[in-house]
Structure formats: structure tokens, C-alpha cells
């Protein structure tokens, strides 16, 4: 692959990344792809904030999944207990039909 094509693809990836962060991008060749009017530290801060939001969302989904799992286990435990009683009653009736 020619080097000019690699550079063009890398520049396009950089532009898409900065657009996702909501930052303006300078298309001026003299600025070597710098972000227009934004300090480099601000780019890092915006990136970290965006990543932090994604991490918080993942944790929230994990907590919801854990809560649903606990509720399902409690419900199935109650169903299992009543189902066990039904099978025991049926077994007793099958052994001695005079007790039912």
C-alpha cells in the first residue's frame, strides 16, 4: 500500500475520532492536523470523560443484570420448594393409595 494512502486513511481516522469528541478539526496543512482553537490537554480531558461515561453505563447494566439474576434465583427457589412438595405428595399417594 502506498504511503500517501496510509497517511490519508490515518488522517481520516483522526478526523472521525475528533468529530466524535465534538471537536473542530483544522484542515490547514501547516497546522499538521492540530485541533483548531483547542488545547491538547482539553482533547485528552474530553476523551477521558467520554470513556468514563461508557464505563459508568457498563457498570449500571451489570448491576441491573445482577439484580435480575438474584430475583430469578429467589423466584425459582420458591417454585422448587413447592414443586418438591407436590412430587413428595404424589410419591406418597402412589406407594399407599389409602393415605390420599
Image (spheres, rainbow, N blue to C red):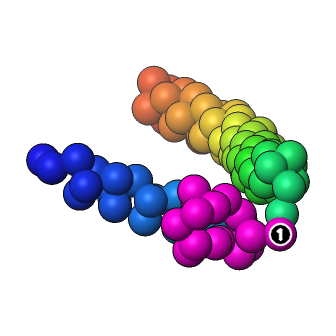
Residue drawn where x is 56% and y is 74% of the image: 27
Q: Is residue 25 above or below residue 13?
A: below
Choose between 24 and 61: the one closer to the eye.
24
Secondary structure at numbered mark 1: loop
Percent across and percent down for residue 94 are 44, 32
- Magenta-span inclusion, residue 33: yes
- Magenta-span inclusion, residue 74: no
The answer to whether 83 appears left or right of 68 in the picture is left
| Residue furthest front in the image | 30
The answer to whether 2 appears left or right of 97 in the picture is left
The answer to whether 89 appears left or right of 23 in the picture is left
Query: Is residue 60 among what the camera can see?
Result: no
Magenta residues span 21-37
Percent across and percent down for residue 26 are 64, 72
| Residue furthest left in the image | 1
Residue drawn where x is 12% and y is 47% of the image: 1
Please tell me in which quadrant of the rendered image residue 59 appears. Answer: top right
Query: Is residue 96 among what the camera can see?
Result: yes
Residue drawn where x is 49% and y is 29% of the image: 91
Considering the image in quadrants, where does the C terminus appear? top right
Choose between 67 and 94: the one closer to the eye.
67
Q: Main secondary structure of the magenta part?
A: loop
Residue drawn where x is 71% and y is 75% of the image: 24
Percent across and percent down for residue 53 are 81, 54
Q: Mark 1 highlights which residue?
A: 37
Amino acid at each position: 500500500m502506498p504511503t500517501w494512502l496510509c497517511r490519508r486513511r490515518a488522517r481520516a481516522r483522526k478526523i472521525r475520532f475528533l468529530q466524535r469528541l465534538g471537536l473542530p478539526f483544522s484542515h490547514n496543512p501547516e497546522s499538521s492536523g492540530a485541533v483548531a482553537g483547542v488545547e491538547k490537554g482539553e482533547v485528552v480531558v474530553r476523551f477521558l470523560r467520554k470513556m468514563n461515561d461508557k464505563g459508568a453505563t457498563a457498570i449500571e447494566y451489570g448491576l441491573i443484570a445482577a439484580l435480575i439474576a438474584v430475583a430469578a434465583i429467589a423466584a425459582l427457589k420458591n417454585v422448587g420448594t413447592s414443586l418438591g412438595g407436590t412430587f413428595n405428595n404424589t410419591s406418597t399417594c402412589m406407594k399407599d393409595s389409602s393415605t390420599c
